[in-house]
Amino acid sequence: MPAVIEINGLSKAFTRFRRGRRVALDGFDMLVEPGQVHGFLGPNGSGKTTTLRTLLGLVRADSGRMALFGQPTPHGLPAVASRFGAIVESPQFFGNFTGRRTLRLLAVAGGVPPTRVDEVLTQVGLRDRADERVKAYSLGMKQRLAVASALLKQPELLILDEPANGLDPAGIREMRDLMRGLAAAGVTVLVSSHILAEIQQICDHVTIISRGRRVAAGPVEAVLAGFDHGEFRIRVAEQTRAAEIIQAAGLTVAAHPDHLVVAGTEDPARISQLLGEQGLWLRELTPLTPDLESVFLELTDTRPRPGVPRQVDESVLPAATGAREITISVDDEGARS
Ligand SMILES: Nc1ncnc2c1ncn2[C@@H]1O[C@H](COP(=O)(O)OP(=O)(O)OP(=O)(O)O)[C@@H](O)[C@H]1O
Ligand SMILES: [Mg+2]
């Protein structure tokens, strides 16, 4: 089976009047296999929307190859148009139409049976507000309407650019449930987001982009494991003495104001034994497992610096700094189990 989305070496620069060129994509790669719920992460301005717009034929690439369901795009798009739904940035709807009328018109235009309209309205939670005008909708309700429009065709692939924008916590949770439900029904989902915890909860695979280049890709677990430094946080009453004992045993230890970070052993029992034998009792022993947020901040170098507002283009340029590219080959069975 061909990959659902395959992007190789995609480059795009925008030429701005009197201001030269701005490179948005710089040899970007992405692979999305059938059945994945694939998160697309990157700082503001890193090229996510440009990637999706280029893939959908809305922006012309300078170079690179792209395919949807094995069909090269943009030329092959008409052949696969019925197989995917996409929302890229905030779609505009006609404010004077109701949500239901909007979807009915889209259904007619797309050759979708009108019965589908009620189904998608219910699916996105708009059933009871479907007969109000779109201009009276909140941002989150417009977002839901957009998702409903993308679902009309019962797509095999759903592409969502920042679907959580404007949604309240309940809305975000519902969007998450909706995506999970779609994934369980076999729909492949590509979702870009800034909400890393959200991505970590929904997605099984992830691609991280920084300054137009891929800096990490693979199953979420594998990407996180690549950043697991095997460290433990410990709290203990006599911190200085504890640090000496641990160091003397050949482990490494870093002191923080109220805790120590210990590395150099895979077995936490070794730490508690070392200290216990000297009459020091642990108050806390926690493995420091990376989450997507810390990995993202490390890879894109967008960690906040106290008192220095970060500018949008200050994320890391991968080749310039030698940032690691971790591309974990996708063992689909293993990754989804
Ligand atoms: N039409 C355009 N003309 C000029 N520059 C553009 C255009 N579209 C995007 N860019 C530039 O390309 C870069 C990538 O923008 P893009 O919208 O793809 O980022 P993004 O990752 O989607 O960011 P965000 O998370 O803020 O949505 C930015 O520097 C942006 O200013
Ligand atoms: Mg964007």
Image (tube, rainbow, N blue to C red):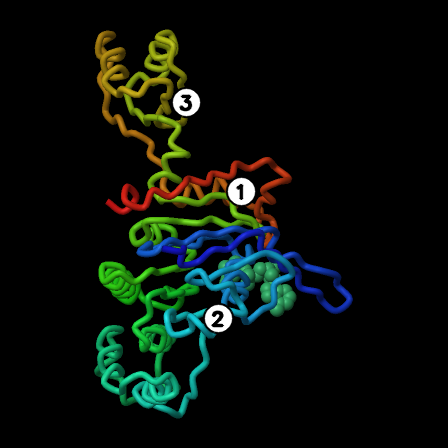
Q: Secondary structure at mark 2?
A: helix
- The mark found on residue 77 in the picture is 2
Q: Nearer the viewer, residue 255 or 147?
A: 147
- Numbered label attached to residue 118: none
What residue is shown with label 3?
Answer: 255
- The residue at 27%/87% (across/down) is 114
Query: In the image, which disc is placed on residue 301?
Result: 1
73 lies above or below 131: above
Q: Amino acid at mark 1?
A: Asp
Disc 1 within 8 angstroms of ligand 1 (CB): no
Quadrant of ligand 1 in image: bottom right
Secondary element under disc 1, as helix, strand or loop, is loop
Which amino acid does the dot numbered 2 rest on?
Leu
* Residue displayed at 56% across by 57% down: 65
Residue contact at pointers 1 and 2, CB within 8 angstroms: no
* In the depicted structure, whether residue 228 falls above or below residue 83: above
Query: Looking at this view, is 261 or 268 the one in front?
Result: 268
Quadrant of the frame with the N terminus: bottom left
Q: Residues within 10 Å of mark 2 (few under 14, many from 20)?
A: some
Cβ of mark 3 under 8 A from ligand 1: no
176 to the left or right of 86: left
| Circle nearer the viewer, 3 or 1 | 1
Task: Sort mark 3 into few (<14), some (14-19) or many (20+) by Cα contacts within 10 Å.
Answer: some
Q: Nearer the viewer, residue 300 or 21?
A: 21
Dot 3 or dot 2: first in sequence order is 2
Query: Residue 264 at x, y = what percent?
Result: 37, 18
Across and down, in percent, residue 160 comes to 40, 65
Residue 221 at x, y = what percent? Answer: 33, 40
Disc 3 and disc 1 in contact, CB within 8 angstroms: no
Q: Residue at x 32, y 26 (%)?
A: 232
Give the alpha-carbon distance from disc 3 to disc 2, as whole Å: 56 Å
Label 2 residue near ligand 1, CB within 8 Å: no
